[in-house]
Image: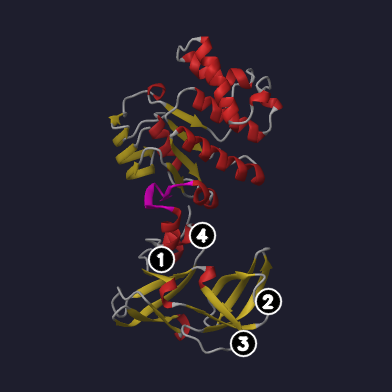
Amino acid sequence: MPDVRVVNVSKRFGKVVALDNVSLHIEEHEYFALLGPSGCGKTTLLRLIAGLIQPDSGEIYIGGRLVNDVPPEDRDVGFVFQTFALFPHMNAWNNVIYGPKVKGFDMKKAETIGHEVLEMVKLHERLDAFPNELSGGMMQRIAVARALGAGAKLLLLDEALGQLDAKVRNELRYDIRRMAKDLGLTAIHVTHDQSEAMAISDRIAVMKKGRIMQVGSPTELYMNPQNIFVAYFIGESNFLEGYVLEAKGNVASIELRGGLKVQTADARFEIGGRVVLAVRPEAFSVWKGAKKEKNAIHGSVERVTFEGTNMRYEIRLENEDMIVLVRPSMIGEWFNIGDRATVSFQSDKVHVFAYPETGLKEEIAVE
């Protein structure tokens, strides 16, 4: 099945820059996610690949073929929309075999394809049902079946699970990935839900304001974010601002606001340079009261949330910064609001970034 290459593609809508010189390579058979906040350009990029709109500049290749001037119907693409885009006057069966019939397949072949894809999406028993007789999850299964029945080699999903309730969404996302993998398709899945992208994707492109911030596997993006926005958008991070006091070998001493001092295992930055530390909530250790530990910072508990498997604590540090940490709810002693606490982190469990010229607030803004 085809790979997809996007080369220096830009797209404007009036004064709005939807895509700004984007380049991307999606490998054949890959289940790939475009992830980012609303308005970041991910749907625009998907529609460009589908041929529904044209780029202002740049080139798009599907399976090595330049498709800038190729109409959507000749790109072997199946598009699944967020809005259950089924023909309301057709039952499930006729929705599914519509593609093969339009492509000129004889009725026997079209029926064979219809039976196969309806079995695949586990809705063969509802082939006589009309869209208004189906649940949201069933309608999206039919939409996927229709795309597969039309012979799509490239499956494009635009927030396809966004209108479903959480339980159905969680089940269907794995079903769609399974079908794509079983058929050897290349799939591009647009979503703003990071948990959805992390759960089912081979790789993810994180987007912001028309640009790609980083591409990598879910593990790579979480464990090694290359910039502050990815550290913020993938998972959750605490950001602590400071200056480099000293750097020796692979160890840097950082002074945080309020004179708090910590060490990191990242000494790339010049002495005096302003930096931002990103620490995941689970990277913190915490003790009641005052305790001497490496990178120890003292504070008090301001909020406690029971999340089932985890306890979530919001702690106000001595320098007035607020941090969030999580720890397993079944391990150790629970904290209460008002408890004095000591938190620390290992030097190699923190990501260090240069302080952004536009400021931290602007750097992590999603709009």
Q: Position of residue 281 (x, y in %)?
A: 54, 69
The secondary structure that most of the magenta stretch takes on is strand
Question: Mark 4 = which residue?
Answer: 235
Q: What stretch is highlighted in magenta?
A: 201-217
Question: Mark 1 = which residue?
Answer: 359
Residue type, label 2: Trp
Residue type, label 3: Gly
| Residue 251 vs residue 82, the one in the foreground | 251
Q: Give the answer, above or below, for where 33 lies relative to 323.
A: above
Q: Distance between the residues labelled 1 and 2?
A: 36 Å
Q: Earlier in the sequence, mark 2 or mark 3?
A: 3
Residue drawn at (55%, 74%) of the image: 322
Q: Distance between the residues labelled 2 and 3?
A: 13 Å
Q: Position of residue 68 (x, y in %)?
A: 31, 29
Q: What secondary structure is found at the residue carrying circle 2? A: loop
Residue type, label 1: Gly
Q: Earlier in the sequence, mark 4 or mark 1?
A: 4
Q: Distance between the residues labelled 4 and 1?
A: 21 Å
Q: What secondary structure is found at the residue carrying circle 1? A: loop
- Circle 1 packing at 10 Å, graded few (<14), some (14-19), many (20+), is few
| Residue 238 vs residue 18, the one in the foreground | 238
Q: Give the answer, above or below, for where 227 lies relative to 103.
A: below
Q: Give the answer, above or below, for where 318 lies relative to 23.
A: below
Question: Mark 2 = which residue?
Answer: 334
